[in-house]
Image (tube, grey):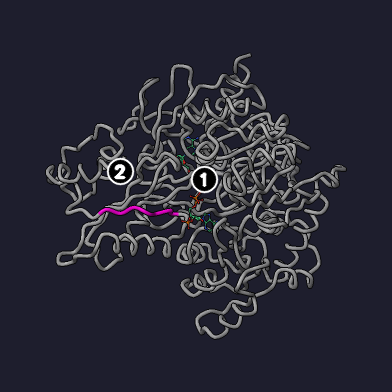
């Protein structure tokens, strides 16, 4: 077949999106069925499935129980860090979610209200997400590796009534106390949260009672603190609330080029349709099959392929609390494949590189029966061909790269192995998925021919499940994504299409840094460095890193008269970034330089610096203010290779 079926389907999805998506909508149980797919009345801001109603928690849970699959396992919590592993059937998960919804309802949460979820990888994370969806409340999950200030900025923007958290998260080397971070974020935020619900975990120093007392003493906060178990015992279960398909399901904040994160909105109906389609067609996961997505629920991959998509199609999802290596060894994934009979494993290239570093011969694979594994899916950053080849040979399954973003919620380009597998080309994420019309544009917006690298842009409208807007800010959405190339969504990535239409994604065109598949803003880290009293100006760039893809690296110019010791300054600056942004920034490297290269209008030439450091031939703009600065900087940049 060689992909002809898929290519025809893709062409049909672009030619007649109404027909295509109304047909795909048949996979979802609606309260009011869709008669119209696309609403373009407010173009370039589009909506999917207007006048349609549903409940996503019902679609993920109750309907499978009603269809007689209540005893099938829905969720397996596999913890390599605690002895608490357990699993939930669809019937049990529905009850847990309904109980959590009842608690939230009794705390005053209703449709459209926001709830921040700041939880480690424990079952309460998906339970809380689905409980919000049950009420039509809008969740916003914040990754546990972010510090109080980042949590506060999300509280400020989303204006939630409730924060759901736990006493802490467990990293292999330490316990991360969450409650002091939450308390500090509440103090930093001018928006006042009414309730904090805490899931108690053994072994943490801080308790709900202590935090509640401390909060009472602080005049500027007014949150009531509750223990999850005690509070939910007082509430009856809540049923699914009918919402509009166009209502927001969640907000997920992601890094842009500035310090202010972008609140990516995901809607209810489009998400249900797109994720159902993608789970089966791209990841070949259907009812009763088992998927392990080794990400964190705090990222979009976790939202889509740990929580919503597997449950929408009635599959079993594994929630893994642990690392790819060291918990206890580089065989952690293969153990889970054997134990849980996983057919689809989804991870990031960094995790595979970490496994290869620890177990170069992949010897641990032989210790397990991985015969259930059909595909390995990889996303989050560029998959280098060497890693793709190494893991493909070790596991003897197809290694499927897929390219997407927080904004799109599901793959823009992938190999539809569940429908019509295409030949894999190393270094390529394969073909654009249905509904995505991918173009490569030059700086002036002209379409480039096959083989030429340029800006990857998506012709509007994008398919269902992609962001309809940014939270509370249509204009920022338009300015950030839709203005550079009118009629297109600008992805911020650079790449090319080959003569077969395969897409090769090469990297970001902006100042977004990708560390271990995590997206960081250079501007946000620079703002922290600039707050140090010794720093006159600074630049942060993402330099190539063998393990993590990129590492954020700072270059600072000191104020005149400052003679700080480089070691002391580095320690102070890295500590500052850890405290202000969080350990997730993984910021460890700083160099003091005498000047930074700039254009005559004062723009720092970050890309040129990165190209020199990565050993590429730098493109030096003719507008450079003083070329000698770049010459002086070259010896400092070179050792970073
Ligand atoms: N809460 C608190 N801290 C966290 C955290 C969390 N949820 N997650 C990570 N951190 C901390 C780590 O403890 C580490 O702190 P340290 O500087 O004190 O050691 C720091 O953040 C960086 O962590 P990490 O990025 O995990 O790097 P690592 O060197 O500890 O581990 C890997 C290396 C490769 C094992 C790890 O990066 C990994 O698992 N990568 C895959 C990432 C992934 O799945 N991305 C998917 C996105 S779709
Ligand atoms: P995030 O929004 O955190 O998922 O990050 C999205 C960004 O990660 C994209 O814009 C790309 O730069 C990068 N990315 C994600 N998946 C891939 C992939 N398969 N290949 C290349 N880059 C990727």
Q: Which residues are magenta?
A: 585-591
Residue 403's x, y, as percent? 51, 35
Q: Residue 406: which disc? A: 1
| Label annotation for residue 640 | 2
Question: Mark 1 falls on what kind of element?
Answer: loop
| Element at label 2 | helix
**Residue at the location (66% across, 25% down)?**
419
Counting other residues with Cα less than 10 Å from the Cα at mark 2, is it few (<14), some (14-19), or many (20 or more)? Answer: some
Q: Is residue 599 above or below residue 152?
A: above
Magenta span has 588? yes
Front-most of 501 and 53? 501
Residue 114 visible here: no
Q: Give the percent coordinates (x, y) of residue 51.
A: 66, 46
Asked if residue 234 lies in the magenta stretch, the reply is: no
Residue 267 located left or right of residue 512: right
Q: Residue 275: horizontal and vertical position, in percent?
A: 64, 39
């Amino acid at each position: 077949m060689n992909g002809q079926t898929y290519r025809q389907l893709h062409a049909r999805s672009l030619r007649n999106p109404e027909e295509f998506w109304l047909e795909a909508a048949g996979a979802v149980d609606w309260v009011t069925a869709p008669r119209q797919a696309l609403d373009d009345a407010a173009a370039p801001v589009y909506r999917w499935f207007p006048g349609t109603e549903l409940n996503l928690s019902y679609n993920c849970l109750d309907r499978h129980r009603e269809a007689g699959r209540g005893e099938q396992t829905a969720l397996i919590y596999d913890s390599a860090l605690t002895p608490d592993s357990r699993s939930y059937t669809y019937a049990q998960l529905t009850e847990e979610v309904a109980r959590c919804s009842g608690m939230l309802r009794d705390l005053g949460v209703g449709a459209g209200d926001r709830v921040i979820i700041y939880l480690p990888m424990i079952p309460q994370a998906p339970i809380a997400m689905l409980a919000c969806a049950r009420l039509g409340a809008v969740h916003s999950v914040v990754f546990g590796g972010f510090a109080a200030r980042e949590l506060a900025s999300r509280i400020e923007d989303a204006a939630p009534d409730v924060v759901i958290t736990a006493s802490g998260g467990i990293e292999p080397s330490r316990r991360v106390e969450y409650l002091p971070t939450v308390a500090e974020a509440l103090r930093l935020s001018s928006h006042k949260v009414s309730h904090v619900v805490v899931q108690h975990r053994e072994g943490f120093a801080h308790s709900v009672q202590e935090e509640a007392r401390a909060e009472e003493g602080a005049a500027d906060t007014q949150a009531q603190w509750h223990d999850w178990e005690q509070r939910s015992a007082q509430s009856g279960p809540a049923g699914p609330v009918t919402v509009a398909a166009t209502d927001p399901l969640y907000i997920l904040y992601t890094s842009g080029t500035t310090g202010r994160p972008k609140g990516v909105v995901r809607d209810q109906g489009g998400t249900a349709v797109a994720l159902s389609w993608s789970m089966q067609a791209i990841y070949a996961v259907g009812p009763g099959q088992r998927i392990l997505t080794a990400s964190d629920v705090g990222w979009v991959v976790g939202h889509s392929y740990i929580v919503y998509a597997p449950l929408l199609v009635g599959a079993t999802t594994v929630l893994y609390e642990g690392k790819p290596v060291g918990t206890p060894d580089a065989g952690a994934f293969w153990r889970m494949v054997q134990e849980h009979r996983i057919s689809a494993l989804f991870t990031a290239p960094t995790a595979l590189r970490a496994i290869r570093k620890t177990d170069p011969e992949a010897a641990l694979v032989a210790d397990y029966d991985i015969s259930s594994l059909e595909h390995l899916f990889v996303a989050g950053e560029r998959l280098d061909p060497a890693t793709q080849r190494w893991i493909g040979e070790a596991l003897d399954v197809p290694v499927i790269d897929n390219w997407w973003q927080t904004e799109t919620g599901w793959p823009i380009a992938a190999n539809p192995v569940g429908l019509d597998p295409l030949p894999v080309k190393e270094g390529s994420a394969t073909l654009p998925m249905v509904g995505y019309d991918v173009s490569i544009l030059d700086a002036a917006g002209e379409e480039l021919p096959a083989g030429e690298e340029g800006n990857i842009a998506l012709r509007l409208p994008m398919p269902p499940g992609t962001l309809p807007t940014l939270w509370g800010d249509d204009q920022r959405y338009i300015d950030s994504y839709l203005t550079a190339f009118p009629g297109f969504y600008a992805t911020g990535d650079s790449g090319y299409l080959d003569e077969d239409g395969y897409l090769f994604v090469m990297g970001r065109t902006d100042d977004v840094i990708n560390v271990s598949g995590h997206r960081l803003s250079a501007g946000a880290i620079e703002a922290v460095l600039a707050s140090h009293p010794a720093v006159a100006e600074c630049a942060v760039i993402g330099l190539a890193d063998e393990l993590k893809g990129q590492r954020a690296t700072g270059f600072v110019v000191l104020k005149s008269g400052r003679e700080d010791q480089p070691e002391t300054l580095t320690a102070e600056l890295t500590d500052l970034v850890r405290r202000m942004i969080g350990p997730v920034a993984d910021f460890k490297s700083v160099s003091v330089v005498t000047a930074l290269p700039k254009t005559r209008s004062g723009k720092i030439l970050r890309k040129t610096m990165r190209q020199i450091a990565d050993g590429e031939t730098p493109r030096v703009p003719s507008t450079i203010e003083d070329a000698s600065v770049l010459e002086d900087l070259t010896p400092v940049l070179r050792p970073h290779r």
